[in-house]
Image (tube, rainbow, N blue to C red):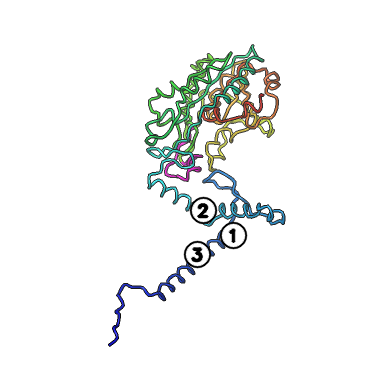
């Protein structure tokens, strides 16, 4: 009698396996097709608030674009940026990375208590030598003007206890000292010591953004005021909260939105009347604060409305001094504190400024020049060399 092989209960036949594979393939194909259709036909976005950048637009078809591969490359970027539920998928992937122990995402350190840190810049001797030489040239060409330099340390230097374990950092205090040693004819302001001795260092930097807070800027203002010999006794600075839902550039770049920050504006008492002129935009306002930015993603832009090539403030201050601030965005929350002490403040951002700095100094009758940057921007930025060389 022919032996009959019994089929094991859990054994899958070749026919069943092929059927399962076919069904799985069809389901995956349908899923991918559905997602592709939703990505192509869904609402298109020009700008991602979470990532703080413009998204790729629909590519245009051309024979030359197809031949050189540009069309396919643009299509890939378009589908990637306009992918269905992209923001949620990015956040999910980031949370999985953190769960698996990853502590650096897109050059951002994921620290304790929801603090995010920008990976610090490396000191480039050649770049800094050129930058400081250009700054020295400005001082040399204007010997009758008082010159100051104030470079602010970043969060990785001041609130180190919130960094992830073994995160590679730079000694920014030493870096800033090296920069100061190359400057000639300038009064340098030590902001590192003042910020390191603050009672509540965790209040000095935003958790989700690369900027310092207004409270940190207030400490820096006191050091700058001493260097400039400003009489600050008649005035008091109040810090008023204007939003507690700020999620800044570090949250956007990393895809981590676990914390909210509070933004404060500095209000000087008694109040000094002033006007603000945005030179290239040919607009004038009576306040340095732009409340409309509190309803947008980049709420730090409540200070001046963002960065501009040149902003000029004329005040009713009892002073004949004219200050030029050559700056990055760290200055935006500090400059309002300086308004009561100068007749005019000219704020110049060399990243956007294309006119002659020397002509502007002479035209405005500048008596004081303050270079105000944060360390990371100062070490990385090439605008000082590009515009002043």
Query: Which residue, given by chain and number where applicable, does mark 3 sit on?
Result: 31
Residue marked by disc 2 = 86
Secondary structure of the residue carrying numbered label 1: helix
Q: Are marks 3 and 2 in contact (CB under 8 Å)?
A: no
Q: CA distance from mark 1 to mark 3?
A: 14 Å
Which image quadrant: the C terminus? top right
Q: Secondary structure at mark 2?
A: helix
Left or right of 10 in this view: 152: right
Identify the mark at residue 40; answer none if there is no mark.
Answer: 1
The residues colored magenta run 245-264
What distance separates the C-alpha of mark 3 from that of mark 2?
A: 15 Å
Select label 1 or label 3 by which is in front. Answer: 3
- Residue 376: image location, x then y, percent: 52, 30
Q: Is residue 88 magenta?
A: no
Between discs 1 and 3, the one toward the N terminus:
3
Q: Give x and y (percent) for residue 344.
A: 63, 21
Mark nearer the N terminus (2 vs 1): 1
Contact between labelled residues 3 and 1, with CB atoms less than 8 Å apart: no
Q: Which mark is residue 352?
A: none
Q: Residues within 10 Å of mark 1 (few under 14, many from 20)?
A: some
> Which residue is drawn at the image coordinates 58% and 24% (left, top)?
126
């Amino acid at each position: 009698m022919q032996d009959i092989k019994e089929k094991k209960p859990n054994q899958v036949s070749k026919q069943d396996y092929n059927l399962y594979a076919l069904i799985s393939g069809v389901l995956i194909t349908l899923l991918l097709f559905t997602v592709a259709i939703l990505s192509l036909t869904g609402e298109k976005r020009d700008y991602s608030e979470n990532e703080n950048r413009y998204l790729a637009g629909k590519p245009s078809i051309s024979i030359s674009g197809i031949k050189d591969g540009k069309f396919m490359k643009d299509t890939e970027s378009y589908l990637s940026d306009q992918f269905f539920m992209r923001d949620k998928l990015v956040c999910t992937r980031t949370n999985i990375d953190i769960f698996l122990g990853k502590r650096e995402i897109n050059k951002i350190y994921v620290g304790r208590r929801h603090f995010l840190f920008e990976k610090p810049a490396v000191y480039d001797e050649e770049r800094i030598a050129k930058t400081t030489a250009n700054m020295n040239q400005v001082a040399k060409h204007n010997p009758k003007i008082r010159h100051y330099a104030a470079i602010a340390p970043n969060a990785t230097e001041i609130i180190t206890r919130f960094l992830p374990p073994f995160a590679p950092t730079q000694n920014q205090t030493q870096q800033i000292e090296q920069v100061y040693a190359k400057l000639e004819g300038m009064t340098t302001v030590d902001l590192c010591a003042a910020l390191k001795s603050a009672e509540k260092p965790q209040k000095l930097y935003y958790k989700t953004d690369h900027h310092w807070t207004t409270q940190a800027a207030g400490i820096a203002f006191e050091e700058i005021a001493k260097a400039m010999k400003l009489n600050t006794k008649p005035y008091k600075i109040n810090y008023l909260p204007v939003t507690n839902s700020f999620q800044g550039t570090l949250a956007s770049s990393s895809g981590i939105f676990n914390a909210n920050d509070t933004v404060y504006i500095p209000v000087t008492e008694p109040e000094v009347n002033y006007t603000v002129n945005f030179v290239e935009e040919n607009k004038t306002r009576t306040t340095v604060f732009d409340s409309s930015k509190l309803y947008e993603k980049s709420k730090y832009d409540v200070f001046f409305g963002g960065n501009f090539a040149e902003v000029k403030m004329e005040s009713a201050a009892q002073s004949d001094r004219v200050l030029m601030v050559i700056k990055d965005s760290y200055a935006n929350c500090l400059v309002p504190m300086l308004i009561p002490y100068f007749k005019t403040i000219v704020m110049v951002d060399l990243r956007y400024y294309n006119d002659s700095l020397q002509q502007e100094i002479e035209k405005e009758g500048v008596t004081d020049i303050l270079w105000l940057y944060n360390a990371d921007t100062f070490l990385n930025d090439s605008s000082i060399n590009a515009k002043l060389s």
